[in-house]
Image (cartoon, rainbow, N blue to C red):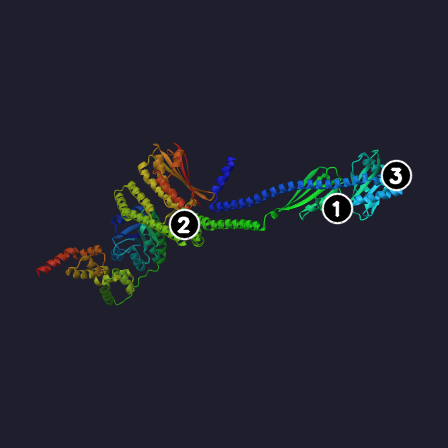
Amino acid sequence: MYKVMIIDDEKSLRNLLKNIIEREKLDLVVVGEAEGSIEAINTIDDIRPDIAFVDIKMPFMDGIELSKIIINRYPDMQIVILTAFNDFEYARKCVGIGVCEYLLKPIVRADIRNTLIKIIEDLNAKKTYTKEIIKESYEEICKSDTIDNIKLYIEGNYLKPDLNVAAIAQEFGFNASYLSRLFKAETEIKLIDYITECRMKKAIDFAKKGTLMYVTAKNVGIPDPNYFGKCFKKYTNKSYSEYKKIICKSNNII
Amino acid sequence: MKVKKDFIRSWFYNKKLKEKIRVLFLVLVMTHIATFFLTYYFIKKNMLDYMLDSNYNTMISIGNNLNVEFEAVDTMSKLIMTNSNVLKYLRANEYGKFISSHDAIMAMYEISNMFNHVSSIYIFKNKRDYIHISNQITYINTDLIFSSDWQDEIIKNKGLYVIRVNGDGAFEKRSGDLVISFIRIINDIDTQMPIGIIAINLNDNILEKTYKDMVSTDRNFGYFDDNKSLLIGNYEFEKLIEIDMLNDEYKQFIKQDIGSATIASYYNISGMPFVLAQTGRITFLKYFSDQAIGVSLIFIILSIVCLCVIGVFLFVYIAKPIDILMQYVDIVKKGWTKKNTKNEYLTSKKIKELSISKSTLIEVNEIINELINKEREMQKAELEILQEQINPHFLYNTLGTIADLALQLSNDKLYDAVETLGNFYRKFLSKGSKEVSIEEEVSIVKDYLKLQKLRYSEVFEDEYDIDEDLLGIKVPKLILQPLVENSLYHGIRLKGEKGTIKISIYSKDNKMYIVVFDTGIGMSKQQINQIMKEDDKKSFGFKRTIERIRYYYNEEDVFEIVSQEGAYCKVIIKVPL
């Protein structure tokens, strides 16, 4: 059973793809979806899919940029680019970065099936090979120092939209899942949530100054205002505009 | 004859301008030369006629001269015959012989001195007696003279004279020169009985004298005797005159040479054993003055040179440039878009030869290219606008949404339809490559027919028979779909009963055949002929498809339609592999 993540800004396409994958009964499960590249970067560490469908044409960060990041950080992950014929020239660039599979829009079941069968075969072959290598090194290191360093690193790099657990793990030379567990154990908060929290605190500062949401979003490292909105609401239980209104009112009262 | 004339006319019209000028030029030169020769011929003929005429007159007058000479000799003989001393000698008996012969000889001297040409005179008495006078030493054959053979003719002629060359062998000059013997019988005046024979031997200059005044470098005369042997004159006569022919009274022979002619003629002088012969040479040019010949020669040469110059001028400056222009026009006709080597060659090398205006033609070339480019860009822009209007992203996403809805409703049939439509448009609208593989081309048609079946499932069946080796062959995009659409809409649907559309692709003789067969209403011969006509709006799609195929393969003969009205229609596309 392999995990699949679908990254596309069209909800209907995500649904359609999910439906088709489930109907084809290929021993696959769709475990996550993302509306855009930014959301994908921030959620992919939790999801850890084996296969990612990436739409090539997305706002804020296109599928090619995302694919580059994924290939860099998750070398075992299989990427399937979704493209319309029109973008074919565009899609050809992907060859250079190591993406192997394409699906042409509008998607057709036969194509999806053939592509997925091929990928599953590849994964099966790799799995037997990599299983033995994965050994987590539980070295006794100075945990509190590491956590502090990580927090400092986040403080300094939250503006980068591609900052996520894997990026930090790579930076500090850890296995990503080990780092997550370590961070959770030490701070009682998930590392990815800590990053978001960090960004949201900055965002609240901007909100207080009355900055427009899309500007704030850019200034805290989540340049996709839709995803930023989601995160902000999750963190403050209010939408950015509501929050701004309240702040303004209280300022006026004072 | 008329056919031949038409043939020549059409042959001439079909020739290239260059060749026409060549032919005209040739005809002109030929006419010129022919005129020259005709003129020469007529002048020559007139001259010859004149010469022949004057020759005849000359011969007659020479003949008359000879007759006059002999009349003088006749007179002389009569004077001698009637001389009393001579008569005395002839009448005398043997005893008074000596005295009377002396007187007779003296008389003969006296008389002969009054006349010219006399070589010797003999008077024969019967019984081998004779007297003679002579200016040159002459041998005499008395045996022959006194034989009856020799005398018979003379006696028979009674008093009339006989002329014999060398007296038929009786006389011979010591010098070897000829003598002409004038012989007659002498009758006694009183008794009218023959008493002797007189022979006057004349020098051959008597003959020569008759024509002496008329001899020139171009004209010669001579005499033959009746035995056809030459008496006096040049030996060339024997070559020129066919001796056997001497029987006629007068005859001429003409031997033609370039620029001259030799005329030989002979004349049998009546009553004499002589044939007068004449050779004359006419040099025609001699009758023109040197200046006239020079002027006409210069004229002829100048006119030929003029013709040549004009011909060359026409050829180089008019015919050839036009020819090159025509080639240009041909290339323009075939399309400037194809940058072939021939085109390059023409623009660079040949235009230099044109020299009328290289830059003009290149400008025209550039203007045309510019126009073509503009037109092409316009078309491209229009196409892009069209494609933008269709907006594949919107279409695809919408199709995806509908497909999703269908899946949510678990409506598989609907989902299938939407998926097929999406697949069809994905291939149909794809831009970029203008050529696709047979496999893709067939799959477009399959999707198309699958969608059409949603609407017309009761109307048709589709079948495919495709050579799998050909699946990878590239063809211009969307050449099959318009044909299939025609089969459906103009063939099967109009028939009202269920039909079949069959697509076969196979190769034969290094050609690929793409056949769309339908069991529709078919087409009449007239309709088939009409289909490629420009003004037929109904077949617009078909025409454009064929034109694209022709353009792509650069071949004219790419399709064939076989049909039987009411039964079937078969469109066969054949393209090189």
Question: Could you say which is closer to the camera, residue B104 or residue A44?
Answer: B104
Q: Chain of mark 1?
A: B
Q: Give the label, 3 or 2, closer to the camera.
A: 3
Mark carried by residue B338: 2
Question: Could you say which is closer to the camera, residue B133 or residue A43?
Answer: B133
Give the percent coordinates (x, y) of residue A174. 29, 63
Q: Which residue is mark 1?
A: B205
Are marks 1 and 3 in one subunit?
Answer: yes
Task: Give the CA distance from mark 2 to mark 1.
Answer: 100 Å
Mark carried by residue B92: 3
Question: Could you say which is closer to the camera, residue B414 or residue A28?
Answer: B414
Q: Earlier in the sequence, mark 3 or mark 2?
A: 3
User: SS at mark 2?
Assistant: loop
Task: Give the CA distance from mark 1 to mark 3.
Answer: 36 Å
What residue type is disc 1 on? Asn
Judge the density around disc 3: few (<14), some (14-19), many (≥20) Cα neighbours within 10 Å: some
What residue type is disc 3 on? Ala
Specify whether residue B14 is in view: yes
Q: Earlier in the sequence, mark 2 or mark 1?
A: 1
Q: Chain of mark 2?
A: B
Task: Give the CA distance from mark 3 to mark 2.
Answer: 133 Å
Give the percent coordinates (x, y) of residue B495. 35, 32
User: SS at mark 3?
Assistant: loop
Judge whether B406 appears above or below A55 on screen.
above
What residue type is disc 2 on? Lys
Are marks 3 and 2 in one subunit?
Answer: yes
Specify whether residue A116 is in view: no
B111 left or right of B59 in image: right
Quadrant location of residue B522? top left
Are marks 2 and 1 in one subunit?
Answer: yes
Q: Give the label, 2 or 1, closer to the camera.
A: 1
Q: Earlier in the sequence, mark 1 or mark 3?
A: 3
